[in-house]
């Protein structure tokens, strides 16, 4: 039985920025936006941009003094 790895490959910002082939100009906003949205979605970052993903609390709810590990990630 072969098990496929379905987890996404996350790219560094420096790699992602080179994948944006169409640079934003005054005449190509819709094309640029489409390209950027697909890239953000593939990296599971779109929710941070369109605000559909609520930000994590900065501190752990148990005592509000320890940093939240998930926030730091």
Image: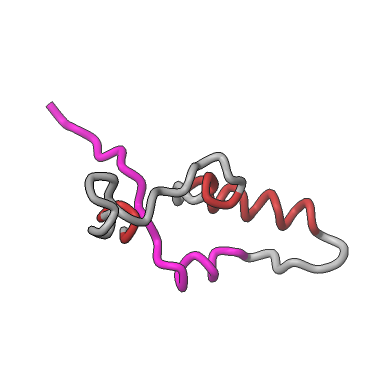
Q: Residue furthest bottom?
A: 14
Image quadrant occupied by the C terminus: bottom left
Question: Going 35% across and 52% down the picture, which residue do you hit?
Answer: 9
Q: Residue 45 placed where, x, y %?
A: 49, 51
Q: Residue furthest left?
A: 1
Q: Residue furthest right?
A: 27
> Does 37 sit above or below residue 28?
above
Question: Going 60% across and 64% down the picture, which residue do you hit?
Answer: 20
Say if the magenta span includes residue 4.
yes
Question: Going 40% across and 61% down the picture, which residue do you hit?
Answer: 11
> Does 16 sit above or below residue 63?
below
Magenta span of residues: 1-20
Image quadrant where residue 7 sits:
top left
Q: Residue 5 placed where, x, y %?
A: 25, 40
Question: Going 54% across and 69% down the picture, which residue do you hit?
Answer: 17
Image quadrant occupied by the N terminus: top left
In the displayed structure, does residue 30 sit left or right of residue 14?
right
Q: Residue 23 placed where, x, y %?
A: 70, 68
Q: Nearer the viewer, residue 48 or 60?
A: 60
Across the whole image, how many numbered discs are drawn on residues? 0
Q: Residue 63 placed where, x, y %?
A: 23, 50
Say if the magenta span includes residue 18.
yes
Q: Nearer the viewer, residue 11 or 73?
A: 73
């Amino acid at each position: 039985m072969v098990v496929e790895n379905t987890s996404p490959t996350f790219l560094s910002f420096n790699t992602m920025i080179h994948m944006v082939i169409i640079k934003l100009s005054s005449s190509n906003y819709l094309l640029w936006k489409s390209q950027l949205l697909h890239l953000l979605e593939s990296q599971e970052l779109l929710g941070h941009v369109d605000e559909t993903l609520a930000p994590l609390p900065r501190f752990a709810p148990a005592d509000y003094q320890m940093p939240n590990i998930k926030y730091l990630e």
